[in-house]
Amino acid sequence: MDVQQYLKDLETLVDMDSFSTYPEGTARVAAWIKDRLDKAGWTTELIPVGDAVGPCLKAVWGNPEHYDVILLGHMDTVFPAGTVKERPFSIEGDHYKGPGSADMKCGDLFMVYLAEALAAEKVAGNVCLLFNPDEEISSRYSRPVIEREARKADHALIMESARPNGDLVNERKGICKYTITFQGIASHAGVNPDQGASAINEFIRWGEKLIALADRKAGTTLNIGLVQGGTAANVVAAQCRCVVDVRIKKSSEGDRIERALRELEAHPFDDRVKVTVDGGVARPPMMPTEKSLAFCHLADQIAAEQGILFHWQAAGGGSDGNFTSALGVPTLDGLGPVGGNGHAVTEYGEISSLEPRFRFLEALVKAVLTK
């Protein structure tokens, strides 16, 4: 690959604001990628998934009904519109920087360069490239499209950046997200406190129960990450709201958490407080299987041939690989360039990793196509 041209193309992509709920931005990224893939001879389709976000972009090489491999990337970032103006694409030593540069426009661009390479060689096989606009908000709009296309695939590659040490990912925790709303009764805290029913007090009593649901041995963590409630110190709070993040290694743990929350919802400590639990499993666990471990072994063989070293990691964060893996599709994650500090102003990717990691990706895809 031409690394300098790649960096110029990456600058173009990074300097397009594409916050998840900024449809114009992700649509602009999709249009740029689509133009490149159209020129390379791929069959492309923009797929609307709702007014709140931009479209998905699907590109197919070969049979549109069955894929030897599907590659997934997301076009959205966590940075609001206007961030690019404040902090555009830049290069500092061996690092490229900018909003979404490593998470994950570099991986999207790997997919474009791969498509052009396969087309130039007229490689036989069936490949799908799927770009979605809302991964950073749990792919809530694009999930049906991801699952529909993944069901046609024998293998899946997720184009998130490799870990900062170069490792790839073959295991991710599942994610459950809940918003719990407490509706109490307001009253004067000094004059008639007994006439009120405190939503905050109800939350506090729930809090102990919620924390106790974590199970470190099972790999289940629970974090109450946001709490909002009340209006003034001298008012018995009529409202409170909390947001809970749960990470699971087993689907059965998600079921356990769900049952516990519904039981608490049905039996509040103060029956004058109405409690509503919204949410559930946002991403199922991505766990190694016999087939996925065989895919890892193939990747290890290709990497050795290419002179590339890495290990396999389990990650606490989720990706669209959680969806493909849950469908039984052997899934490998972290096939993009090496990078780190995603979601932070210090986000970066390593320029020196571009050529070897792309060479590895291309060799791995060709190996899958010739199996």
Image (tube, rainbow, N blue to C red):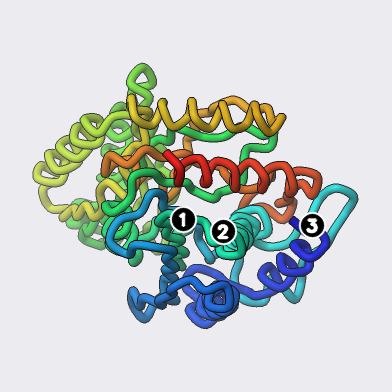
Determine the secondary structure under disc 3: helix
Marks 2 and 3, the one that precedes in the sequence: 3
Tell me: residue 275, above or below residue 166. below
The residue lying at 71 percent from left, 29 percent from top is: 307
Determine the secondary structure under disc 1: loop
Of the two numbered discs 3 and 1 in the rendering, the one whose residue sits closer to the viewer: 1
Q: In the image, 203: left or right of 197?
A: right
Which label was assigned to residue 118?
2
Q: In the image, 365: left or right of 237?
A: right
| Residue that badge 1 annotates | 124
Of the two numbered discs 2 and 3 in the rendering, the one whose residue sits closer to the viewer: 2
Q: Look at the image and tell me in which quarter the C terminus lies.
A: top left
Residue 224 position in % (x across, y down): 40, 42
The residue lying at 60 percent from left, 48 percent from top is: 362
Q: Say whether marks 2 and 3 touch (CB < 8 Å).
A: no
Residue 15 position in % (x across, y down): 70, 73
Of the two numbered discs 1 and 2 in the rendering, the one whose residue sits closer to the viewer: 1
Amino acid carrying mark 2 in the image: Leu
The front one of 282 and 94 is 94
State the image quarter where residue 335 is shown: top right
Residue sitting farthest toward the top: 217
Q: Distance between the residues labelled 2 and 3?
A: 18 Å
| Residue that badge 3 annotates | 3
Q: Look at the image and tell me in which quarter the N terminus lies.
A: bottom right
- Res 340 seen here: no
Q: Distance between the residues labelled 1 and 2?
A: 9 Å
The residue lying at 50 percent from left, 57 percent from top is: 73
The residue lying at 52 percent from left, 74 percent from top is: 41
Q: Say whether marks 1 and 2 touch (CB < 8 Å).
A: no
Determine the secondary structure under disc 2: helix
Task: For label 3, count other residues whose C-alpha is less than 10 Å away and answer few (under 14), some (14-19) or many (20+).
Answer: few
